[in-house]
Image: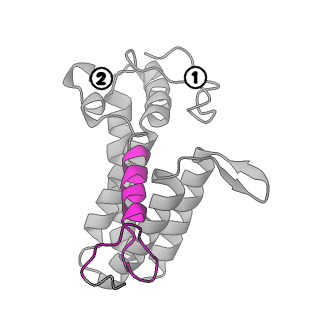
């Protein structure tokens, strides 16, 4: 019996070069991974901005850095990406590093365990940041990288200082221990 012209009911790995199930799982992981970031409208709610007092600025920065950690990482990485547009080698290295960021930080839905030890999100963020900076510095775009990081950090700190924290709920476990010494949010 011939099967010419029939549509196969099951996909075989040899006959189907594209695995659509893998693509749909990847889309779902991207959606789930990016869902852990805070909504941008919540981050830039105009009613939640005012100048802090000197005593509450540090507390606000600490709370907002813990609450909007993933959003702030995205902002700094976007600024870094834009600064590397005129350095093709650095841009290629940055894109490779972004793939590593996606898998190890943004899209990870399970805790990271290395050699039987649980690695927190804060440690992953710090290590990936340092590795990204060091690898990019080897591409000889040092001034662009340092200026972009400085601009990104300044923007993040300004936002964290002027964004009120009254409407934010930060769980100490979700914050990765960043709020242990912080007083009441202001």
Residue furthest to the front: 1
Q: Nearer the viewer, mark 2 or mark 1?
A: 1
Numbered-mark total: 2
Q: Residue at x 64, y 45 (%)?
A: 120
**x and y percent of residue 156 in the render?**
36, 43
Residue furthest to the left: 46
Residue under label 2, please give it: 51
Q: Can you tell which quarter of the image residue 7 is in?
A: bottom left
Q: Residue at x 36, y 55 (%)?
A: 27
Along the horizontal axis of the image, is 135 left or right of 93?
Answer: right
Helix, strand or loop for disc 1 = loop
Q: Which residues are magenta?
A: 5-32
Figure quadrant of the N terminus: bottom left
Residue 12 among magenta residues = yes
Q: Residue at x 27, y 21 (%)?
A: 48
Residue under label 1, please give it: 182
Residue furthest to the right: 116
**x and y percent of residue 177 in the render?**
63, 33
User: Badge 2 local density, few (<14 within 10 Å), some, or many (20+)?
Assistant: few
Give the Cα distance between marks 2 and 1: 19 Å
Along the horizontal axis of the image, is 49 left or right of 98?
Answer: left
Residue 45 among magenta residues = no
Of the residues under marks 2 and 1, which one precedes in the sequence?
2
Q: Can you tell which quarter of the image residue 69 is in?
A: top left
Q: Residue at x 59, y 47 (%)?
A: 110
Q: Is residue 131 above or below residue 119?
A: below
User: Badge 1 local density, few (<14 within 10 Å), some, or many (20+)?
Assistant: few
Q: Is residue 142 or residue 42 the one in the foreground?
A: 42
Q: Is residue 38 or residue 8 the one in the foreground?
A: 8
Q: Can you tell which quarter of the image residue 24 is in?
A: bottom left
């Amino acid at each position: 019996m011939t099967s010419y012209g029939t549509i196969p009911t099951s996909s075989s790995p040899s006959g189907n070069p594209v695995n659509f199930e893998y693509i749909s799982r990847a889309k779902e992981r991207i959606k789930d991974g990016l869902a852990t970031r805070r909504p941008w409208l919540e981050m830039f709610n105009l009613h939640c901005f005012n100048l802090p007092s000197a005593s509450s600025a540090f507390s606000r920065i600490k709370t907002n850095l813990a609450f909007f950690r993933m959003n702030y990482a995205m902002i700094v990485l976007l600024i870094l990406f834009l600064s590397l547009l005129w350095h093709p080698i650095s841009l290629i290295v940055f894109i490779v590093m972004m793939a590593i960021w996606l898998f190890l930080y943004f899209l990870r839905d399970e805790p990271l365990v290395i050699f039987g030890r649980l690695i927190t999100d804060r440690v992953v963020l710090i290590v990936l940041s340092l590795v990204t900076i060091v690898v990019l510095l080897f591409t000889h775009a040092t001034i662009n990288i340092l200026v972009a990081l400085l601009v990104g950090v300044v923007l993040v700190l300004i936002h964290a200082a002027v964004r009120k924290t009254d409407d934010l709920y930060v769980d100490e476990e979700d914050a990765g221990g960043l709020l242990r010494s912080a007083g009441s949010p202001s």
